[in-house]
């Protein structure tokens, strides 16, 4: 790790340099031996990787950037970590995030902000700002993130990196600290589409420990990045996502990309998904509901921090004191919202309605993919925001996710790739999404555009 860069950026919550070095030296020794073991090395063996700190790792603290997990050492590895260790990728350390992956700027971390390597006064996006900043600043060639509503793709767009959210069920969630289980998916952050595809291919596959894991074979992802042909590809642009919502020169940049796609022989048309304007609202009811349930386990008894009121207290008092001290503002806000949305008398009006909208959004996307192979748009409405700008008003922060959320609601794959720079010289992302299980297709299209 470049210590000077990291001092200014603060991408990492924990560095694991000694162990990473040992793995790298082991790989070097195997390669030098030239024996059969060398032939069996995974192509990514020896390539360092940074891990978002909501993915559990033996031997390294895992905090999800929350005080409530301060000092917690997981007794097991996430399935993706086992895979990465088996393939001998040195794990550089654990990266910063918004607490429990809730946020769009990494400012909701309990352990300080991460800064955008392109402009230290700006956010790297969130929640996976640490992973994106580490890759964007050349501190790590690869990183893992988690994406519930855009937390891999929005930071990728803000830092000029590639970030993909796999089809739901493609990558095991076992050992990912749950935020909203019906949306969470681990995915790759990298400097190029081919690197992202190689990492995705490594971590994808069935895992009996995740009940939503698919049995699909995903061994074509890297191969897909080698074919660079866009002719005849049917590309859809969403009617509902046109124009004025995008600022900072992002829409103009996107038009340039569309022109380029047309020149390359793609067939660009407008598609309609009439329920899309409600997706964000549905998301911000479904997510807090699942969050309020998932975060109930942090009770001061089972994991991490325990706060005992002075002079002792009942179990309920210990739980309340622990949660009051351990959770930050955004976590508390979502727990309260979610508990309300799920409470008797309101559950049908809020959670039920949101689920019905989710079904309509899924149907809209399904219908639209009858006419197009992929859909493209800018990844974010703005370039990376200045630190502090959105802290006062979470509602403006929630709007950052308008493009990325539908893919999580529908479980479909999506990727953000760098698409030049816009105002303030900041990078912008191009968002590409396809139907469920079309992961190889979005890598192919992304690689051709890149
Ligand atoms: N910004 C979104 C949220 O706060 C996305 C979170 C995520 O993908 N983990 O919910």
Image (cartoon, rainbow, N blue to C red):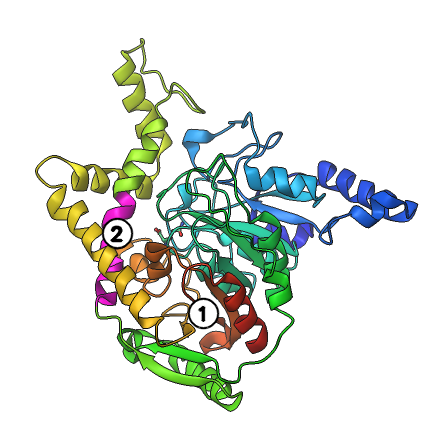
Magenta range: 275-288
- Decide: few, some or many residues near mark 2? Use Cα within 10 Å; few <14, some 14-19, many ≥20: some
Q: Nearer the viewer, residue 206 or 446?
A: 206
Residue ID at (42%, 38%)? 211
Residue ID at (43%, 73%)? 373
Residue positioned most to the top: 311
Q: Is residue 276 magenta?
A: yes
Q: Give the main secondary structure, helix, strand or loop, of the magenta stretch.
A: helix
Tell me whether circle 1 and circle 2 mark residues in contact (CB < 8 Å): no
> Is the residue at mark 2 in contact range of ligand 1, meaning its CB lies under 8 Å from it?
yes
What residue is shown with label 2? 284
What residue is shown with label 1? 432
Q: Nearer the viewer, residue 38 or 47?
A: 38
In which quadrant will I find the C terminus? bottom right
**Residue 368 drawn at (x, y percent):** 32, 72
How many numbered callouts?
A: 2
Position of residue 415 relative to residue 177, above or below, is below
Dot 1 or dot 2: first in sequence order is: 2
Position of residue 143 relative to residue 269, above or below, is above
Q: Is residue 327 magenta?
A: no
């Amino acid at each position: 790790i470049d210590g000077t860069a990291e001092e200014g950026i603060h991408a990492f919550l924990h560095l694991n340099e000694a162990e990473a070095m040992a793995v790298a030296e082991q790989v070097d020794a195997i390669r030098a031996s030239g024996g059969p073991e060398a032939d069996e090395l995974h192509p990514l063996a020896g390539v360092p990787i940074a891990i978002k700190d909501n993915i559990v790792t033996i031997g390294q603290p895992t905090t999800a950037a929350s005080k409530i997990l301060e000092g917690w050492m997981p007794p097991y590895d996430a399935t993706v970590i086992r895979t990465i260790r088996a393939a001998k990728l040195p794990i550089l350390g654990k990266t910063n995030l918004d607490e429990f992956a809730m946020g769009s700027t990494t400012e909701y971390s309990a352990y300080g902000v991460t800064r955008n390597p392109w402009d230290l006064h700006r956010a790297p996006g969130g929640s996976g700002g640490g992973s994106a900043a580490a890759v964007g600043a050349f501190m790590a060639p690869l990183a893992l993130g988690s994406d519930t509503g855009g937390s891999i793709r929005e930071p990728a767009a803000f830092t000029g990196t590639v970030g993909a959210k796999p089809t739901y069920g493609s990558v095991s969630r076992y050992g990912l600290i749950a935020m909203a289980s019906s949306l969470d998916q681990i995915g790759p952050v990298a400097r190029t589409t081919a690197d992202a595809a190689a990492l995705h291919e490594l971590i994808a596959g069935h895992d009996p420990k995740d009940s939503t894991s698919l049995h699909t074979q995903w061994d074509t992802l890297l191969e897909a990045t080698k074919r660079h042909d866009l002719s005849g590809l049917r590309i859809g642009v969403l009617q509902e996502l046109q124009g004025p919502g995008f600022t900072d020169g992002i829409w103009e940049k996107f038009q340039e990309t569309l022109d380029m796609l047309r020149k390359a022989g793609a067939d660009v048309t407008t598609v309609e998904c009439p329920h899309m304007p409600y997706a964000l609202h549905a998301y911000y009811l479904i997510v807090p509901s699942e969050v309020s349930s998932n975060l109930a386990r942090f009770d001061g008894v089972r994991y991490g921090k325990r706060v005992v009121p002075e002079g002792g207290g009942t179990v309920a008092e210990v739980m309340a004191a622990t949660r009051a001290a351990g959770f930050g503002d955004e976590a508390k806000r979502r727990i309260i919202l979610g508990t309300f949305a799920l409470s008797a008398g309101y559950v049908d009006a809020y959670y039920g309605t949101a689920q019905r909208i989710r079904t309509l959004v899924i149907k809209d996307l399904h219908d639209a993919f009858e006419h197009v192979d992929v859909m493209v748009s800018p990844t974010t409405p703005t370039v990376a925001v200045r630190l502090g700008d959105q802290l006062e008003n979470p509602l403006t922060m929630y709007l950052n996710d308008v493009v990325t959320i539908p893919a999580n609601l529908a479980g479909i794959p999506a990727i953000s790739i760098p698409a030049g720079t816009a105002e303030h010289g900041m990078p912008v992302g191009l968002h590409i999404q396809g139907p469920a299980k079309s992961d190889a297709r979005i890598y192919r299209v992304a690689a051709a555009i890149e």
